[in-house]
Amino acid sequence: DTAVSQTPKYLVTQMGNDKSIKCEQNLGHDTMYWYKQDSKKFLKIMFSYNNKELIINETVPNRFSPKSPDKAHLNLHINSLELGDSAVYFCASSPRTSGPSYEQYFGPGTRLTVT
Amino acid sequence: SQKIEQNSEALNIQEGKTATLTCNYTNYSPAYLQWYRQDPGRGPVFLLLIRENEKEKRKERLKVTFDTTLKQSLFHITASQPADSATYLCALENQAGTALIFGKGTTLSVSS
């Protein structure tokens, strides 16, 4: 039973395209996150959603937009893809509703390559 | 702004030895600190969480310490095994308490 799943695992696309990455968690957690891990392996928070409400939004270009149809899903839409968007994107969830003071469960990641 | 440093990018040790990884932070006082393990091509996996009022926490062969005076956490793996080879990430909450900030990680290699 996969706790946090992401699709697709790999995504290769051209500059200027629009793409989406899907994330689902079956843990019943209240908060979900999107992280970006760049080529230097630095893992950085992008967004978090709590009960379908965006509660943080770091300095991320507005070409990136999280969409949560329900508590178990948090999808990431990216418009007008750029070369610098190439990275591994991780979805995560946490049982905590107020702040990440509990452990986070990560998905397997989506490797995005923009050519 | 908050800064997290993991002392070395790579650590090589022999099987059976104790691995010690360091995480230092500056500019604020987090209420807790977490350690994660990441294998190549996989997402991070939670290992341990230690709160500011806890000096030490153990889980099987893992031990974490949290020194709020030194602003440092040490992560120990005793009786290390080749299967312990991975990248270990330290993470702290940000000042707003809304997100985790990760260190760049230390890649541990345990040779048999």
Image (spheres, grey):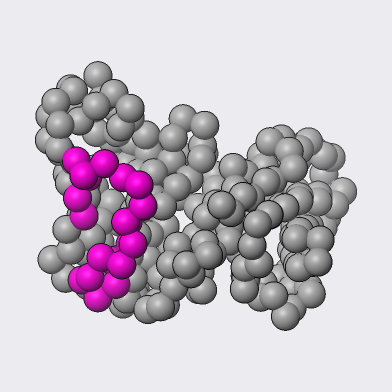
Quarter of the image where one finds residue A85: top left
Residue occupying image coordinates x 36% and y 52%: A58
Q: Find residue B66 and report its horizontal and vertical position in percent.
A: 75, 67
Return the residue found at the far right.
Answer: B17
Q: Is A64 placed left or right of B31 in the picture?
A: left
Vertical position of residue B30 compared to residue A19: above or below: below
Write the residue at 22% across / 70% down.
A53
- Judge left or right: residue B51 versus residue B17: left
Q: Which residues are magenta?
A: A47-66
- Is residue A102 in view? yes
Residue nearest the observer in this picture, B64 or B110: B64
Q: Is residue A29 left or right of residue B53?
A: left
User: Residue, x 44% and y 35% (percent of image)?
Assistant: A38
Residue A87 lies in what quarter of the image? top left
Of B26 and B100, nearer the camera is B26
Is residue A26 visible in the rendered image? The answer is no
Quadrant where the image shows the C terminus of chain B: top right
Name the chief secondary structure element in magenta.
Answer: strand
Q: Is residue A53 magenta?
A: yes
Q: Is residue A3 left or right of residue B12?
A: left
Identify which residue is drawn at 82% across, 39% down: B13
* Position in image of residue B99 (x %, y %): 45, 62
Residue B7 vs A13, above or below: the answer is: below
Residue A51, percent from left and from top: 24, 75
Number of labels in the image equals 0
Query: Where does residue B67 sit, x and y in percent of width and height?
Result: 79, 66
The picture quadrant where one finds residue B8 is top right
